[in-house]
Amino acid sequence: MRKALSRFASGVTIVTTAESSHKDSVHGMTANAFTSVSLDPPLVLVSIANRARMNTKISETKRYGVSILASDQEPLSLHFAGAASQPDLVKFVWRQGVPLLEGALVHLSCTVTNSHLAGDHTLHIGQVEELWYDDGRPLVFYTGSFRALELQRTEGDLGF
Ligand code: FAD
């Protein structure tokens, strides 16, 4: 399962949450199980392992932020996966009382509308309350490795 699905290339996000904008209560984790769900209303979802500390925290705060990482933010991704500690790189900005990672390509501040238990993960559907984005190269995760995109259009590109 892991090997097959790792052939679906994804971006990399840091999901964050905090209790009522309290700076000391911020918690973050790396996640690539993120998807857009609906445009009207604007909904996204993140799939969080039931055993992750983040799962309990989102269930309590009912808010989360999604920062879509740029290609130079791999160290942050490792940090928030508990793989290689880099606390000096961690800088938060706040939108709608939700912490987000400085230097990311996209910031989404979300309020949880529904949470669905799905096997060993929970799907947290969030309504986007505020978004911000910048141009740049995304960090990519593919076959278990971090990659950077060559931003080259294919011949049949439909230009969405
Ligand atoms: P912890 O493991 O306790 O915390 C994670 C790390 O973040 C720790 O090192 C902690 O020090 C640091 N941290 C937390 N808050 C702060 C803060 N305020 N300031 C500074 N540092 C902080 N898991 C999923 O459930 N779903 C996914 O979609 C998913 N995708 C992944 C994609 C990739 C590319 C990788 C590498 C991992 C992915 N994981 C995913 C695994 C997940 O990131 C780890 O299991 C993570 O450790 C779970 O975090 P936790 O909430 O249990 O907290």
Image: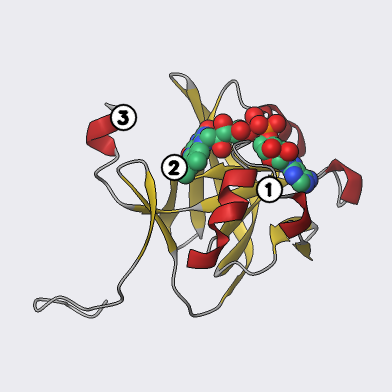
Residue 75 appears in the rendering: yes
Q: Left of 41 or right of it: where is 26? A: right
Sequence-wise, which precedes: disc 2 or disc 3? Answer: 3
**Label 3: which residue?**
2
Q: Position of residue 26 (x, y in %)?
A: 80, 45
| Residue depicted at 64% across the width and 45% down the height | 79
Residue contact at pointers 2 and 3, CB within 8 angstroms? no
Residue type at mark 3 is: Arg
Give the spatial CA distance, label 1 vs label 3.
24 Å
Q: Secondary structure at mark 3?
A: helix
Q: Residues within 10 Å of mark 1 (few under 14, many from 20)?
A: many
Pointer 1 residue Cβ closer than 8 Å to ligand 1: yes
Q: Position of residue 138 (x, y in %)?
A: 44, 66
The quadrant in which the C terminus is found is bottom left
Q: Residues within 10 Å of mark 2 (few under 14, many from 20)?
A: some
The disc at residue 16 is 1
Sequence-wise, which precedes: disc 1 or disc 3? Answer: 3
Residue type at mark 1 is: Thr
Eye-nearest disc, 1 or 3 = 3
The disc at residue 96 is none
Q: Secondary structure at mark 1?
A: strand
Residue type at mark 2 is: Ala
Sequence-wise, which precedes: disc 2 or disc 1? Answer: 1
